Image: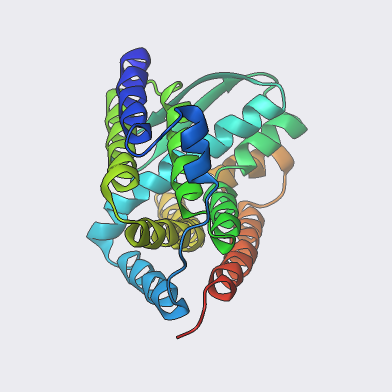
């Protein structure tokens, strides 16, 4: 499954590298590292407002939430590998939940870091994208996201996850290949706002779900609940930590975005 999916995404990426390149990888690298024309600051601000409104619409949020889930699980996987755990696979489900399985010690700092990485993951990616955009590398942001999808695809272990990653990759490739430069910049800014704003939104959603689970007398299997069991620190404290981290990265990333572009 993963091999076939990887082949499909590789074909899409190869297609995106072809137009306008004069020297294969060298030509692509030149495109990625060439600063893009910056839109006006008001444009970036309006894009941010549009993304914020979209995140408040239940149906739209449910659709967009899949993108956050992919990055959330990628963060779990990346930290698991960094702390020496053996990655077994990633699943993304139609209800926007996900699961990353890794093998190693069931407790200890490595396991805590792996579990804790998920919710801040999209905000960290958003901050990295904001840094790139602040220097004019909009195309670099799009290729960074394509690289992340390619790495996730290697570990996808269910059909819905495969579909979600391939569709996301196809959309990114379409923007990278056919969209004008200004559109690429606006899309990159929109995706950056999405990760920065969506990260705290996802934490708040987790807390709402935790309350429902507790009212029903069910076991709390959220990341905060798992961390509470691993560290004996109350889950609500972990929720607060997630919100604090995501909020701080949102403020910093948003400042970079708005400071980088010229005013009207």
Coordinates of residue 159 in the picture (x, y in percent) = 28, 24
**What residue is shown at x 31% (from left), y 66% (from top)?**
54
Residue at the extreme bottom: 264
Q: Where 249 sits versus 50, above or below?
A: above
Q: How many labels sit on residues?
A: 0
**Of residues 30 and 165, which is closer to you in this image?**
30
Q: Can you see residue 39?
A: yes
Coordinates of residue 242 in the picture (x, y in percent) = 61, 56
Quarter of the N terminus within the rendering: top left
Coordinates of residue 175 in the picture (x, y in percent) = 31, 48
Seen in the image, is 65 located left or right of residue 131? left
Residue at the extreme right: 109
Quarter of the C terminus within the rendering: bottom left
**Of residues 134 and 105, which is closer to you in this image?**
134
Is the image coloured rainbow, by chain, by secondary structure, or in one colour? rainbow
Coordinates of residue 143 in the picture (x, y in percent) = 46, 41
Seen in the image, is 138 located left or right of residue 106? left
Residue 202: quadrant of the picture: bottom left
Q: Where 170 sits versus 88, above or below?
A: below
Residue 130: quadrant of the picture: bottom right
**Of residues 212 and 23, which is closer to you in this image?**
23
Seen in the image, is 35 located left or right of residue 39? right
**What residue is shown at x 42% (from left), y 43% (from top)?**
69
Q: Can you see residue 222?
A: no
**What residue is shown at x 57% (from left), y 71% (from top)?**
260
Residue at the extreme front: 22
Seen in the image, is 141 located left or right of residue 241? left
**What residue is shown at x 37% (from left), y 70% (from top)?**
47
């Amino acid at each position: 499954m993963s091999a076939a999916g990887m082949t499909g995404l590789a074909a899409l990426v190869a297609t995106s590298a072809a137009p306008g390149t004069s020297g294969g990888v060298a030509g692509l690298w030149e495109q990625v590292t060439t600063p893009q024309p910056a839109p006006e600051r008001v444009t970036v601000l309006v894009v941010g407002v549009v993304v914020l409104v979209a995140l408040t619409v239940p149906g739209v949020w449910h659709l967009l939430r899949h993108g956050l889930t992919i990055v959330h699980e990628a963060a779990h996987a990346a930290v698991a590998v960094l702390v020496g755990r053996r990655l077994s696979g990633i699943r993304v489900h139609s209800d926007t939940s996900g699961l990353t399985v890794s093998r190693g010690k069931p407790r200890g700092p490595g396991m805590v870091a792996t579990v804790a990485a998920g919710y801040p993951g999209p905000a960290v990616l958003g901050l990295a994208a904001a840094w790139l955009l602040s220097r004019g590398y909009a195309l670099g942001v799009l290729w960074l996201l394509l690289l992340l999808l390619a790495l996730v695809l290697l570990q996808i272990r269910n059909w819905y996850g495969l579909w979600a990653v391939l569709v996301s990759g196809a959309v990114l490739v379409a923007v990278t290949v056919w969209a004008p430069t200004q559109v690429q910049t606006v899309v990159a800014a929109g995706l950056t706002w999405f990760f920065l704003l969506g990260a705290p939104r996802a934490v708040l959603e987790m807390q709402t779900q935790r309350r429902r689970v507790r009212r029903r007398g069910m076991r709390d299997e959220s990341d905060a609940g798992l961390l509470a069991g691993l560290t004996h620190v109350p889950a609500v404290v972990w929720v607060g930590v997630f919100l604090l981290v995501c909020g701080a990265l949102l403020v910093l990333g948003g400042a970079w975005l708005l400071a980088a572009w010229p005013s009207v």
